[in-house]
Amino acid sequence: MNHRLRIISVFVFIAILGLAVFSAPEPQQATANDYSDHFPILAYAEIITDPDSGEAGRIDILRQDLGNGQLSHDFVYNDPRRALFNGGNAGVTYAVNTGFQSADANLNDQVFWMYDSILIWNAEACADLTLSENAIAPGTPGVVKRFFDTGVINLDWVADLTQVGFLSAADFSYFAQNPNVLGVTFTLFWADANGTTDIDNNGKADVAFREIYYNDQFEWADNGLEGVQPSGPRIFDFPTVAIHEAGHGVSAAHFGTIARQDGVLIAHPRTIMNAIYGGTLRDLTGHDHASTCANWAQWPQR
């Protein structure tokens, strides 16, 4: 089946705000020193866009994401700064907020897919992610949403990776300002007076936490419907987008070459982490497996 493809863009922006925290650098993991001058910054957003956004590009090769498929920022094992907010867990925790659901008729079990999109990555036998769930009160406003509303990063997140859920443009100023965005994963880094930190000395910026949001201005489904409907709006497959965004949540980067061939956007090779939405794809592909294994097989000793 041919599907119209959608571009996924990457926007980077920095918003430095204050915090208080704790401890010192040591290879592979952190121990207890003084990190009281460290604070979170909103540093990165990966977005999936609607195909009618005008962002399809006007050249043959639109982008090439090569390399190891890993983001240049990651969680620190046994990070005492994260431990203040995730319940003291040395590893990576996740939460699913059930208070922001879409009313779209073809979404039968969106909460299941918010969970499963994370667990599909956690189930990789070659990786030692061992994610654990933290409870979050339904309807708790996302930290990033409140930042866009108030300019303040509240120090009250409960997990390292949170599925916040569906918000409309009226509820989330980011979607109002970026109406073509289907979904977005925000990453906050730890920083100090000298910039972003790398306390485990692995060459990657230290992640404080991540939040995932989905744009409820679009029509979503998880029952197999996808694409332009005979008598209705274009429908997007929610599991496909959720698995992609959860991939960013566990530090997977975009991968593959995005090009235009005979007027149609294509991705090569086809993977969950392509920088385009190419229709329904709910299984990790060979490269998705490889990049996850390479990044997490040695966790925490990496």
Image: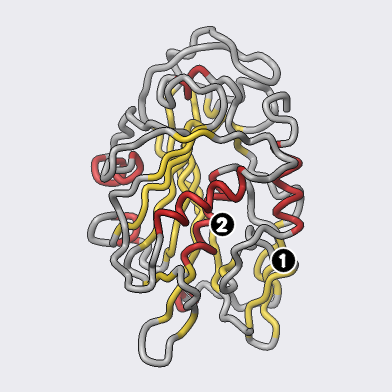
From the viewer's side, name the closer residue of 36 and 209: 209
Label 2 sits on a secondary structure element that is helix
Q: Is residue 49 above or below residue 250?
A: below
Q: Is residue 233 above or below residue 103?
A: below
Figure quadrant of the C terminus: top right
Residue under label 2 = 244
Label 1 sits on a secondary structure element that is strand
Q: Tell me which corner region of the image, top left, top right, bottom left or bottom right, holds residue 179.
A: bottom left
From the viewer's side, name the closer residue of 165 and 75: 165
Amino acid at circle 1: Thr
Q: Is residue 10 above or below residue 238?
A: above
Q: Tell me which corner region of the image, top left, top right, bottom left or bottom right, holds residue 141.
A: top left
The picture places residue 210, in percent across and down from the top left corner, at: 47, 40
Which residue is found at the position 57% from the left and 20% from the top? 78
Q: Are marks 2 and 1 in contact (CB under 8 Å)?
A: no
Residue under label 1 = 257
Which residue is outermost to the bottom?
Answer: 230
Could you tell me how many numbered marks the image carries? 2
From the viewer's side, name the closer residue of 62 and 251: 251
